């Protein structure tokens, strides 16, 4: 039995459990076209089974916009969806939280980014309720580097713009948000005694940093991390969730 298996078995006995999961690279393999990402079938089945168990809250916590996350994941209630790095909960709309100055700042930010990336091959913009993400995964390396450097020196340096770097993406927002703060909200709402959180990106480190004794953090893939455990890829996450279903369902 691995240390992670043992930790999962301990989690299964917690009276009230929160399972919070990033989507891309965790539940779904990374793909070149983000709209084509889908959770692995076995993983999706395990998530549905977990969410059906008593005193168990399952949430997806992603950098994607909320509507996009719902579309690609295929999940809905009782599974909770949180998008835009915690800026959008499925029981509210981040755009309604913007004041007049923030809405103006968002309009200027979007216009400046459209002009900056115009004609750059493989670079795409993702509009979100409180910001814009610049994706360079499909751009030639030299183009991606040039564009992200220009974004950091220009729009990202503007007053009132929060920046969240990720894998081949730079997320710009006119409100401050991170996954760690969102995880705390989810924990409180679920009244959870312990949390399982799995993520693969640098944006997930704010959530790993919020974990408490008795929680379990799982880094998916390579890279420095504050998580105690690590697995290779999405299939391993599915196997972990299946183990948790078996153990918690039979407690």
Image: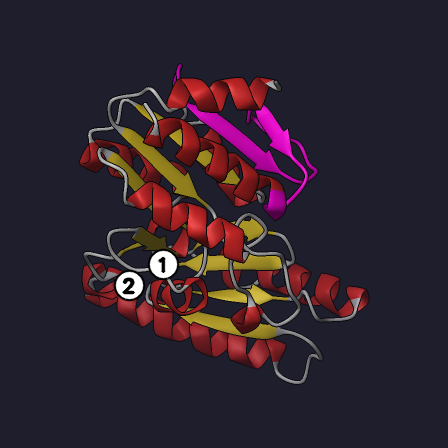
Q: Position of residue 51 (x, y in %)?
A: 30, 44
Magenta highlight on residue 214: yes
Q: Residue at x 36, y 45 (%)?
A: 49
Q: Residue at x 49, y 32 (%)?
A: 243
Q: Secondary structure at mark 2?
A: helix
Quarter of the image holding residue 184? top left
Q: Quadrant of the C terminus?
A: top left
Label 2 Cα crowd, 10 Å radius (few <14 / some 14-19 / many 20+)? some
Q: Position of residue 75 (x, y in %)?
A: 35, 60
Which numbered marker is on residue 129?
none
Q: Position of residue 48 (x, y in %)?
A: 36, 50
Label 2 or label 1, whichever comes before in sequence order:
2
Label 1 Cα crowd, 10 Å radius (few <14 / some 14-19 / many 20+)? many
Q: Are marks 2 and 1 in contact (CB under 8 Å)?
A: yes
Q: Secondary structure at mark 1?
A: loop
Q: Position of residue 7 (x, y in %)?
A: 49, 19
Quarter of the image holding residue 9? top left
Q: Quadrant of the N terminus?
A: top right
Q: Which residue is mark 1?
A: 174
Q: Which residue is mark 2?
A: 102
Residue 145 in the figure: left or right of residue 173: right
């Amino acid at each position: 039995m691995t240390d992670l298996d043992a930790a999962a078995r301990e989690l299964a006995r917690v009276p009230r459990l929160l399972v919070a999961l990033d989507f891309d690279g965790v539940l779904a393999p990374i793909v070149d076209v983000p709209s084509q990402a889908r959770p692995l079938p076995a993983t999706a089945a395990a998530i549905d089974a977990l969410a059906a168990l008593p005193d168990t809250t399952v949430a997806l916590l992603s950098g994607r916009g909320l509507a996009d996350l719902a579309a690609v994941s295929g999940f809905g209630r009782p599974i909770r969806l949180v998008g835009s790095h915690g800026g959008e909960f499925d029981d509210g709309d981040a755009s309604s939280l913007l004041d007049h100055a923030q809405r103006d700042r968002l309009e200027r930010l979007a216009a400046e980014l459209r002009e900056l990336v115009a004609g750059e091959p493989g670079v795409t913009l993702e509009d979100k309720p409180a910001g814009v993400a610049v994706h360079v995964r499909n751009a030639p390396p030299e183009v991606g580097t040039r564009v992200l450097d220009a974004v950091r020196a220009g729009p990202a340096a503007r007053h009132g713009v929060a920046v969240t770097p990720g894998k081949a993406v730079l997320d710009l927002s006119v409100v401050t948000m991170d996954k760690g703060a969102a995880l705390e909200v989810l924990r409180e709402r679920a009244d959870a005694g312990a949390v399982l959180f799995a993520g693969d990106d640098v944006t997930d480190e704010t959530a790993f940093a919020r974990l408490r004794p008795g929680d379990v953090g799982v880094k998916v893939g390579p890279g420095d991390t504050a998580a105690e455990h690590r697995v290779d890829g999405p299939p391993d996450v599915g196997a972990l969730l299946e183990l948790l279903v078996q153990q918690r369902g039979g407690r």
